[in-house]
Every structure is written in structure tokens, then in C-alpha cells.
Amino acid sequence: MIASLLAATLLAAAPVSPLNVVKNGNAAVQKAANAPGATVQSLATVVESFVDFQELAKRALGEKAWKGLTPAQQKEFTDTMTGLLRASYAQKAIGQAKADVKYGKESVQGTEATVDTELTVKKDQVPVNYKLYKASAKADWRIYDVVTDDVSLVDTYSGQFKKILSTKGFDGLLTTLKSKRAQLEKENANTSAASVNESAAGGTGAAPQAK
């Protein structure tokens, strides 16, 4: 009895692997997308449980630019990008909710990991690779980037940010992101998961253009 309880405790405490984080995340999205009355907002909450939008935003901006911001600017940028990413990523996740997913290899190097998958949507096979990290050796694995058909979400945003920063500066970038966030949230406010699923079923989606 004691041995079985100890084994159960150890099992419960065992860290979840990067592969299982991705599998559990996809399962949670499928369940939430098919729930009665599902919306993009409800999906966004589910996605946020396994995707670290703050880390994604920070890496997209770049270490040099990030360190050049004041703590107040860092918080405002992170909050704005988190709202934008929640809305856009949830739309993408809904579009993939009914896709057939094949899981490939898991690669771990220290606190960084990659999980390869392949999505089949309407007979189209699309490679989707997830990049994960953990803040410390004992922290949980979290997704911070998604590479769809060799196109990285972090790299896409990074390229857009650099262009805007070079012409409009940080204030201009922040204004642009706030405007895009407001637009997406307005579109998603009364949008059901079913209607988004219909419009997104033909593809895997992409990062919204911040311009």
C-alpha cells in the first residue's frame, strides 16, 4: 500500500516532457474548440496555459532592444503583445483543431527543446515544429515559438519589429501593436470557434502583419 502510494506520488511529480506538453496542448485545444458555445476568447485562455506569450514577445523584440527599454516600457510592450498573440494564436489553433496530427521526434538541449509534428489539413501535409523552453531546471516546459512550413512565428514578428523600429521608433511600434490588438480583439469578441474553424480549415494561419 505504502509502495503504491509512493509510486503514485513520484509519478504525479514527474516533469511533463516537451512532447507531452505539445500533445496535451493540442488535446486541450480540440476539446475546447468542440465545446458548446466555444469562442476565440475561450480558446485563447486554453492556449495560454501552455504557450508563453511573454517569452515569445521578448524573443521577437530581441535582447538588445529589450534591454534598451525601461521596466515600464517592457511591461507595456509585453502586455500589448500578449493580448495580440492570444487573439491571433487562438485563431490559428482553432483552425488546426480538427487536423490530423502526427508526432515526430523530441529534441532536448538543456532548457531548450523542439517537438516535430506534421498536420494533415484537407489532404495537405504541413510540418509544424514547436520550440519550448523552461525558465529553470525545475520549471515546466512552455512553448514560445511555432515554425509552420519553415516559417517561424518569432522570426516573422522580429522582422516586422525591426522595420517599424527603424522608421517609427519604439513608440511607433507600440502604437501599431495596440491598434492591431484592438482590431483582432474586436473581430474575435463575438466570433464562435465554429465559424473561425470554417474559415481557417483551409490552412494553418500566419502571424498578423504589424505594419
Image (tube, grey):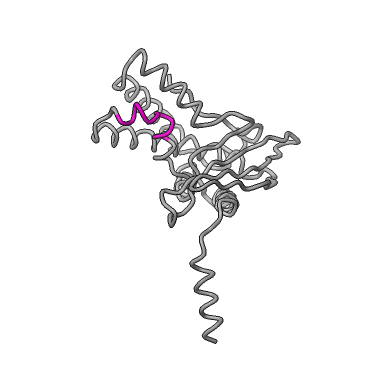
Q: Which quadrant holds the N terminus?
A: bottom right
Residue 193 drawn in magenta: no
In what quadrant of the picture does the C terminus appear? Answer: top left
Q: Residue at x 42, y 16 (%)?
A: 163
- Relative to 62, say whether 133 is above or below: below
Residue at (45, 37) in percent of width and height: 87
Residue at 56% across / 55% down in the picture?
A: 17
Against 143, is 177 above or below? above
**Residue 101: where, in percent of width, then height?**
68, 45
Q: Is residue 24 left or right of residue 138?
A: right
Q: Is residue 204 left or right of residue 15?
A: right
**Residue 147 spot, x, y in % from top left:** 58, 34
Type of secondary structure dominating the magenta stretch:
helix
Q: Nearer the viewer, residue 150 or 35?
A: 150
Question: What is the magenta range?
Answer: 57-67
Return the residue nearer the eye: 12 or 207: 12
Q: Residue furthest front?
A: 110
Percent coordinates x, y for residue 122 in the rendering: 73, 36
User: Does the segment drawn in magenta span residue 65?
Assistant: yes
Taking depth in this image into account, of 48 and 36 the one nearest to the observer is: 48
Q: How many marks?
A: 0
Outermost right residue: 123
Residue 24, picture quadrant: bottom right
Comparing 35 with 155, the one in front is 155
* Residue situated furthest bottom in the rendering: 1
Which residue is found at the position 37% from the left and 14% from the top? Answer: 166
